[in-house]
Amino acid sequence: MRRTVCAIGLTFLALAALGAGEAAFHPDIPKVWDDRAVETMEVLLAQRDRSPRYMTSAEYYALKVRPIYRSYPAYAKGREPAGYLESLKKKEPEVIFDPAKLHTREDWIRAGELVFESETQFRPALASQPSAEDVSASPVSSDGVLPFFRPFFRYYVRKKGVLEVGINACAGCHTRVMPDGSFFEGGQGVPNQPVSEATLIAIRESTPEALQKRAGRAWVYAGAPWVMSKEDFEKSFTKEEIVRRIMASQPSVFIRQGTSYTHPVRVPSLVGIADIRYLDATGLVRNRSIGDIMRYAAINEGLDTLAHYGDFQPAPGATIFSGDEGTRYSDEQLYALALYIESLKPPPNPNKFDEHAQRGQQIFKDEGCPVCHTPPLYTNNKLNPARGFKVPDDLGKTDDIMNGSVGTDPTLALKTRRGTGFYKVPSLRGLWYRDGFGHGGQAATLEEWFDQARLEDGYVPKGFHLGPGPIEGHEKGLDLTPDEKQDLIAFLKTL
């Protein structure tokens, strides 16, 4: 069965705690949907009158809580145990999150892992399974288990005899398959997969009605009427453009809700999130306490589509993410989830601090990198203004903002529902297990990020791109010699 790096660590911690007679844990669970906390948790959008206005506390707590059911792994073709699916159909439904059974801090963390892995949408298993071609293209664990980020690869029994598959777990974007076949939860996930020819043919043969339906879903997902009208947005969803955007997909880059089909965002690592002051590439959410991580999780499971952005509400009446078992987590579930996320640790770093890394560390200092990427967090936890954005005077009183801009493409920061006018200064910790560099993942590797050629007009990025064009901005280190760049990269991979 599946084993994750983090889960193994938690098992050892739990055994140690039991052996030591760990004292009972009395959690201090914040109220998630506190109206004042929700109102102040986000940095205002660049276009202030479009900053999201969320539902009230009374409206939130009137929503039904979704139970957390036990899930079962799916396997790559030919790797599942004999009679596996039939055995699942004989199982009774099992709700596996029960606060009354959580007595220690480690109990709560392990329960949070269950929430992290739990899906929120369900479909009949037999009607939703991918083709054998799609399955064979997916990376798998050493024991043949398919990862969360490949759609419909966890089984659920919510009614005896009825087998379903789930989608939209936190683990879907935040699970990485490591070179040894282990699953690293909290690492930068790789949600996109190779596109089958059958998928492309289906798009090209779409009826006008199907195309209109696809465009309507996309509008709920990423529409911003102050950037582009709904009519123009839907006109852009031609068959050819849809295929072009799908073919541009790259590992670790994701068109999450509120971003852009032409300017998506790099999937972040969640390791060390408690030390990070701003969440999202655009620094949208202030991370002031564990309560903000809880609120962030609730909002990003679909509640943002119910928010009002001025007079625009993406999904009036129903969130596009929540399943039929409810539209929110309980406060206890979110608290456990946040504890689990804050507990995440990376696997052992295989990159040693050798003489190359030692020289690279000195180059890092000489180049002035610690001004923005300050040890030990390797971020100064500040906001950097996007190119062309005039910082409002009042934000200087509430937030830590840098002078000047590093000059990267400003579209995500200025022309999306997550656009604050800023990009946060990211932490460099864990670069060795990450890919997709720059806030939009245009550079596939660190070597490409430090390649002077990426600034040229006709450059073809190796990461996400819809066509040729430069990877703009952040020119630190581009004028180093090839040997100096190798040494700097060697150091960065030790962090």
Image (cartoon, rainbow, N blue to C red):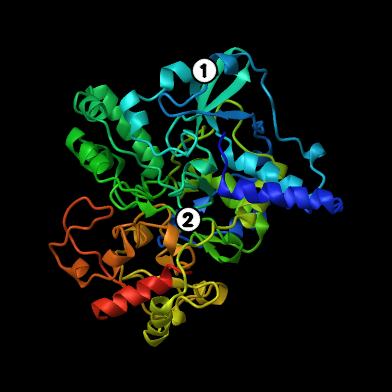
Q: Is residue 405 left or right of residue 282?
A: left
What kind of residue is marked 1? Ala
Q: Earlier in the sequence, mark 1 or mark 2?
A: 2
Residue at 46% in and 56% down: 268
Residue 352 versus residue 70 in the image, above or below = below
Return the x and y of residue 398 as percentages of the image width and height: 56, 72
Residue at 43% in and 80% down: 358
Return the x and y of residue 401 as percentages of the image width and height: 48, 75
Inspect this view and state whether residue 326 appears: yes
Residue at 38% in and 50% down: 252
Residue 87 versus residue 362 in the image, above or below = above
Q: Which residue is mark 1?
A: 82
Q: List the single residue furthest toward the left.
A: 458
Return the x and y of residue 373 as percentages of the image width and height: 46, 75
Q: Which residue is mark 2?
A: 51
Please tell me in which quadrant of the rendered image residue 403 appears: bottom left
Tag 1's secondary structure?
loop
In the image, 80 versus 386, the foreground residue is 80
What kind of residue is marked 2? Ser
Q: List the single residue furthest toward the bottom.
A: 366
Q: Is residue 196 left or right of residue 304?
A: left
